[in-house]
């Protein structure tokens, strides 16, 4: 059995303190609420300047195929963004001419299975979570995006900022006409 | 079916039923997808012996396999025993394909290599030679692009592409190293008729400034032939709409750099162009080397292949009924590019086009709604029009095809639907006209 190509779970096994775990869990929920509310200014404020936001595309391969579809950054990724690129995407919404965003999409992000671990850096924590993101648009457009996330969050001035996020979506063929959503 | 009434090329009219009718769709599977050369894979996707890549021809599931001798074969991905799908991976390398149902096993050359209980249950009477995988009738390559065709009576791929090769070569043959498609296939389902995205890309510069105004403001870093945001102005001398080439089309600017207009930091790309332009000019001549290579070009190979040098995406549309497609996209690179340029292209392609692409965010809704608004009892009886700049085309020195000025025209779309109608009316290839208008070297303008 070999699923390393579709599930990457490097765990240190070192659970963070209850206090840090609680604070970061609340941070994930707050982030999800801001995304649901399209409060993108509030969301960007939670992102570190050295952000790497990565969602690779995953093909259906036989188990014996050991191609690294997850961590090889030279392969295709729907998102492979730094903070400037995230801001560029968001700037389209602010132009007032992104016609397809009006009427608005209705979003719900559900975040679950949160695990918080210490890392080798005292101010950085690895956070595993699963997400269920539901979109409904116009009359009957709807889709569900479900997957795993592996984050690095950094403590800065009493709050946490997202430094790295790897999103492992479970789709092969995307059953939706765009990805106007952050996960 | 009265195909003649569905399209009127002289007025640019299409019946909306061509986007919604089941009968039209069934005839398309037979006369368009069952007859034309269809893109299967790029050689870069199956470089080694026994590499395979799965795709579709119309709705038929096909495996493309690199043979031991380097040749490429393609087979229907279906067991000859009970019809099960024999290959379930998108791509990979396999010494054999074994059916999950009863264990029949096929070699990469399609031969039936193993049958469980062959002697005990079939009493040794099964003629294996009659049960190999069913091959696609014709498979051929043009400069890295592998095409297949179900019709043994179809013209050669070379003749099928005809003078469109003049434009194809601007991408495929500009530099000696050739081209490649990068990374995983970006697949998405769109609830649109397959013809609508083809027409959108083959000639519709009109929508660019309006539908994509937000995306252009977000990422555009250079002028694209005067095509400004909001459609308020367009320099009609800055580009060409090229058609009249067996149903293939090009929509191109002529400045040699604007392909990289939608890169946030175009400088490294422009440096690459300038460093290599002398080589390209030597290989392809002055017109293509200086005016086309590096320009934004939309190339369409009838019926369902499109690629855009500059924005560097490569795409096929697989029909899934009259109202749905699977859209498959890849980033494309020249093998001679330095690694940092290739990486920039891949990132920028995913930022602009494909599932999370800012431009495709705009198109999906529009194409789906155009399809839906062709499905009602009343709307299916209505028409739509591509009647912009009717009759304003002709020859242009140095460029094959029937050509209209500018990126904003509906000239190419009319030729797309004309070709579609020609195929839909023809009962076989012998009834399909061939035309490569205004071939290079011809003196007189030929108007279609």
Image: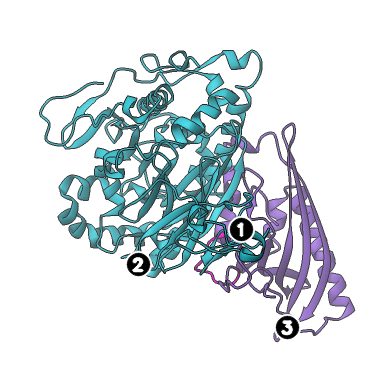
Chain colours: A purple, B cyan
Q: Quadrant of residue B60?
A: top right
Q: Residue at horizontal 43%, vertical 63%?
A: B46
Where is B441 relative to B116, above or below? above
Residue B69, visible in the rendered structure: yes
10 Å crowding of disc 2: few (<14), some (14-19), many (20+): few
Residue B103, percent from left and from top: 64, 63
Residue B263, visible in the rendered structure: no
**Residue hosting label 2:** B69
Which structural element holds mark 1?
loop
**Residue hosting label 3:** A119
**Main secondary structure along the magenta-highlighted residues:** loop
Q: Chain of mark 1?
A: B
Q: Mark 1 vs mark 2: which is more N-terminal? A: 2
Which structural element holds mark 3?
loop
Residue B233, percent from left and from top: 38, 30
User: Start and end of the magenta stretch?
Assistant: A70-79
**Res. A72 mark:** none
Where is B163 relative to B4, above or below? below
Decide which of B97, B19 is in the foreground and name it.
B97
Q: Is residue B157 left or right of residue A147?
A: left
Where is B238 relative to B371, above or below? below
Residue B80, percent from left and from top: 57, 51
Residue B394 forms part of the magenta stretch? no
**Residue hosting label 1:** B88
Label 3 – label 1 distance at C-alpha: 39 Å
Decide which of A179, B46 is in the foreground and name it.
B46
10 Å crowding of disc 1: few (<14), some (14-19), many (20+): some
Q: Chain of mark 2?
A: B
């Amino acid at each position: 059995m070999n699923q390393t190509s579709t599930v990457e779970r490097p765990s240190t096994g070192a659970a963070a303190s209850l206090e840090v775990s609680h604070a970061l869990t609340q941070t994930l929920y707050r982030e999800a609420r801001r995304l649901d509310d399209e409060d993108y200014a509030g969301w960007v404020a939670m992102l570190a300047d050295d952000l790497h936001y990565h969602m690779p595309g995953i093909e259906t391969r036989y188990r014996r195929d050991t191609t690294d579809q997850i961590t090889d950054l030279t392969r295709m990724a729907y998102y492979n963004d730094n903070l400037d690129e995230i801001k560029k995407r968001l700037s389209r919404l602010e132009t007032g001419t992104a016609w397809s965003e009006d009427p608005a999409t209705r979003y719900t992000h559900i975040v679950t299975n949160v695990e918080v671990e210490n890392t080798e850096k005292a101010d950085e924590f690895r956070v595993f979570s699963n997400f269920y993101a539901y979109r409904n648009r116009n009359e009957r457009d709807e889709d569900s995006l479900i997957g795993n996330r592996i984050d690095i969050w950094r403590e800065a001035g009493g709050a946490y900022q997202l430094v790295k996020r790897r999103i492992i979506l479970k789709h092969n063929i995307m059953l939706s006409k765009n990805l106007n959503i952050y996960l | 079916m009265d195909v003649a009434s569905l399209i009127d090329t002289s007025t640019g009219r299409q019946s909306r039923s061509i986007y919604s009718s089941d009968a039209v769709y069934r005839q398309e599977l037979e006369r368009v997808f069952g007859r034309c050369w269809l893109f299967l894979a790029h050689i870069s996707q199956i470089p080694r012996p026994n590499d395979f890549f799965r795709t579709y021809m119309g709705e038929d599931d096909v495996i493309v396999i690199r043979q031991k001798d380097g040749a490429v074969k393609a087979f229907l991905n279906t067991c000859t025993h009970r019809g099960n799908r024999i290959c379930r991976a998108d791509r990979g390398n396999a010494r054999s394909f074994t059916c999950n149902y009863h264990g029949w096993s096929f070699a990469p050359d399609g031969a039936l290599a193993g049958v469980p209980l062959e002697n005990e249950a079939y009493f040794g009477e099964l003629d294996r030679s009659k049960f190999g995988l069913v091959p696609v009738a014709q498979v051929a390559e043009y400069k890295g692009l592998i095409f297949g065709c179900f019709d043994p009576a179809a013209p050669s791929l070379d003749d099928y592409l005809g003078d469109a090769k003049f434009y194809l070569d601007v991408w495929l043959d500009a530099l000696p190293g050739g081209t490649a498609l990068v990374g995983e296939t970006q697949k998405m389902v769109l609830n649109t008729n397959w013809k609508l995205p083809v027409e959108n890309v083959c000639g519709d510069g009109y929508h660019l400034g309006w539908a994509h105004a937000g995306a252009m403001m977000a990422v555009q870093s250079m002028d694209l032939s005067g095509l400004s945001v909001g459609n308020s102005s367009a320099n009609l001398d800055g580009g060409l709409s090229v058609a009249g080439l067996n149903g293939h089309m090009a929509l191109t600017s002529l400045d040699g750099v604007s392909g990289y207009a939608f890169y946030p930091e175009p400088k490294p790309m422009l440096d690459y162009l300038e460093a290599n332009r002398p080589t390209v000019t030597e290989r392809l001549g002055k017109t293509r080397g200086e005016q086309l290579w590096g320009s934004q070009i939309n190339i369409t190979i009838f019926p369902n292949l499109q690629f855009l040098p500059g924005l560097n995406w490569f795409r096929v549309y697989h029909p899934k009924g009259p109202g749905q497609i699977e859209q498959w996209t890849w980033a494309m690179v020249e093998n001679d590019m330095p690694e940092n340029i290739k990486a920039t292209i891949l990132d920028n392609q995913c930022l602009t086009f494909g599932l999370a692409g800012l431009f495709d965010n705009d198109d999906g809704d529009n194409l789906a709604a155009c399809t839906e608004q062709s499905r009602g009892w009343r709307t299916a009886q209505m028409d739509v029009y591509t009647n912009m700049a009717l009759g304003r085309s002709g020859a242009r020195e140095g460029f094959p095809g029937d050509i209209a000025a500018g990126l904003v025209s509906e000239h190419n779309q009319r030729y797309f639907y004309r070709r579609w109608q020609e195929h839909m009316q023809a009962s076989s290839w012998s009834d399909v006209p061939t035309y490569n208008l205004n071939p290079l070297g011809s003196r007189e303008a030929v108007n279609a």
